[in-house]
């Protein structure tokens, strides 16, 4: 990684604040090397990593989930297409599950707008087959959308 990119260069290339890059570093997203003067030096692969993080966060993935997937990528070099394909499979499964849950929500939502019951046996969205009654009184989480 010869001279590498300074943190300022990386910030300019990704659109992130320097403080955000340091934050991602604490979570193991990027791992800069140090030059002889002790300054951080980032590889060009870190641009891809940080871009991926920003995209994944916009899709609702937590930083811990993202970091777990990125740990399998090679350090200090650009990931191959096979590397990206491998980690994308885990994200794809989660995205597909979210799409299914959102589709279910969309399709059932008009039947419960204004209802507010959250405990009736007939509530197909919030309480299918009155399964929430075993958990006590009060509102419960939407199934499939709570992570």
Image (cartoon, rainbow, N blue to C red):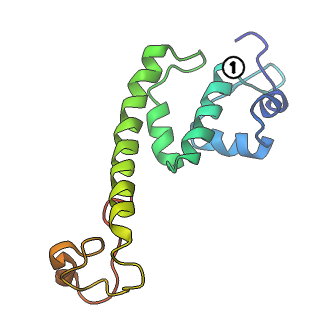
Q: Position of residue 135 (x, y in %)?
A: 22, 81
Q: How many marks?
A: 1
Q: Is residue 18 toward the left or the right of residue 123 in the image?
A: right
Please tell me which residue is depicted at 64% across the width and 20% down the height of the picture.
45
Can residue 146 be seen here? no
In the rendered image, the residue lying farthest to the front is 110
- Closest to the observer, 94 or 7: 94
Is 7 above or below relative to 120? Answer: above
Can residue 28 be seen here? yes
Q: Secondary structure at mark 1?
A: loop
Q: Position of residue 139 (x, y in %)?
A: 35, 83
Q: Position of residue 123 (x, y in %)?
A: 25, 78
Is 110 above or below relative to 85? Answer: below
Identify the image quadrant of residue 140: bottom left
- Closest to the observer, 86 or 21: 86
Please tell me which residue is depicted at 81% across the width and 26% down the height of the picture.
6
**Looking at the rendering, in which quadrant would you find the N terminus?**
top right
Is 71 above or below relative to 64? Answer: above
Q: Specify few, some or many for label 1: CA neighbours under 10 Å numbering under 14, 14-19, or 20 or more.
A: many
**Looking at the rendering, in which quadrant would you find the C terminus?**
bottom left
Q: Position of residue 32 (x, y in %)?
A: 68, 27
- Closest to the observer, 55 or 100: 100
Residue that carries the numbered disc 1 in the rendered image = 43
């Amino acid at each position: 990684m010869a001279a590498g990119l300074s943190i300022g260069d990386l910030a300019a290339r990704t659109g992130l604040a320097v403080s955000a890059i340091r934050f991602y570093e604490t979570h193991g997203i990027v791992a800069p090397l140090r030059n002889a003067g002790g300054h951080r030096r980032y590889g060009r692969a870190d641009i891809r990593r940080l871009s991926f993080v920003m995209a994944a966060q916009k899709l609702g993935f937590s930083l811990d989930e993202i970091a777990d997937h990125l740990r399998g990528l090679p350090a200090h070099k650009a990931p191959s297409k096979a590397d990206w394909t491998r980690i994308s499979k885990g994200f794809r499964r989660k995205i597909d599950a979210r799409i299914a849950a959102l589709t279910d929500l969309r399709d059932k939502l008009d039947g419960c707008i204004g209802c507010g019951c959250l405990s009736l046996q007939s509530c197909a969205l919030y309480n299918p087959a009155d399964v929430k009654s075993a958990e006590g009184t009060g509102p419960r989480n939407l199934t499939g959308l709570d992570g």
